């Protein structure tokens, strides 16, 4: 069995629907993430500032401050630029996807979705953005780690 992907990482799940937050919390915690939740944009921005998560799962359609506004605000901060941000939304129009991409989303996932896929991609992007985030001794491939030269033997793993 492989090591959980989120050990040593903090996540923020932002969605106005409690069942979505519960589902993502469960999946992320099973992968070793420390999970925080927000139900709206202002709460998300406050928690992101206080907790400095490595990854954010962000809904777009929320009352008041929507996910696009949260994404834009986060990407304007130094700590927000270091976060992996996965947009999770029912908005499927190409213009919405393009807007999320232009604002700096690492991934744009439409509902219905596979929560395990979201968790895996969040871990990938979090490790890519913050290679030092994992605890020492991790068996996961870390971003920035180079492949062995052609013809070199890979080190055996335990």
Image (spheres, grey):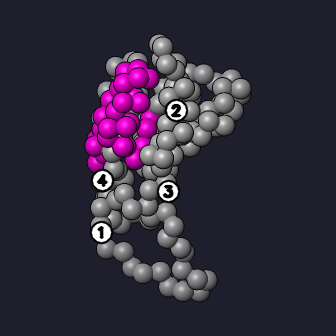
Nearer the observer, 119 or 145: 145
Residue marked by disc 4: 7
Q: Of callouts 3 and 2, which one flags the residue occurring earlier in the amino acid sequence?
A: 2
Residue 73 - label: 2
User: Does the magenta-highlighted stretch encompass residue 40?
Assistant: yes
Q: CA distance from mark 1 to mark 3?
A: 17 Å
Is label 2 in a helix, a strand or a loop?
Answer: helix
Residue 4 seen in this snapshot: yes
Can you give x and y, in whole percent of width and height, for residue 138 in the image?
33, 65
How packed mark 2 is, by other alpha carbons closer than 10 Å (few <14, some 14-19, many 20 or more), is: some
Q: CA distance from mark 3 to mark 2?
A: 21 Å
Task: Give the magenta-colored segment's residue range.
Answer: 28-57
Residue marked by disc 3: 128
Q: Is residue 102 left or right of residue 90?
A: right
Residue marked by disc 1: 137
Can you give x and y, in whole percent of width and height, for residue 107 in the image?
57, 40
Q: In the picture, which quadrant includes the N terminus? A: bottom left
Q: CA distance from mark 4 to mark 3?
A: 15 Å
Q: Of callouts 2 and 4, which one flags the residue occurring earlier in the amino acid sequence?
A: 4
């Amino acid at each position: 069995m492989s090591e959980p992907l989120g050990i040593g990482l903090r996540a923020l799940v932002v969605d106005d629907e409690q069942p979505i937050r519960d589902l993502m919390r469960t999946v992320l915690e099973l992968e070793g993430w420390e999970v925080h939740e927000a139900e709206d944009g202002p709460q998300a921005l406050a928690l992101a500032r206080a907790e400095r998560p490595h990854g954010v799962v962000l809904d777009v359609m929320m009352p008041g401050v929507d996910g696009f506004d949260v994404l834009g605000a986060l990407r304007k901060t130094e700590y927000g630029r270091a976060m992996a941000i996965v947009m999770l939304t029912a908005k499927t129009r190409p213009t919405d996807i393009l807007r999320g991409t232009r604002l700096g989303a690492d991934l744009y996932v439409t509902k219905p979705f596979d929560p395990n896929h979201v968790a895996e991609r969040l871990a990938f992007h979090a490790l890519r953005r913050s290679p030092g985030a994992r605890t020492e001794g991790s068996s996961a491939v870390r971003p920035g780690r180079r492949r062995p030269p052609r013809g070199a033997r890979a080190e055996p793993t335990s």
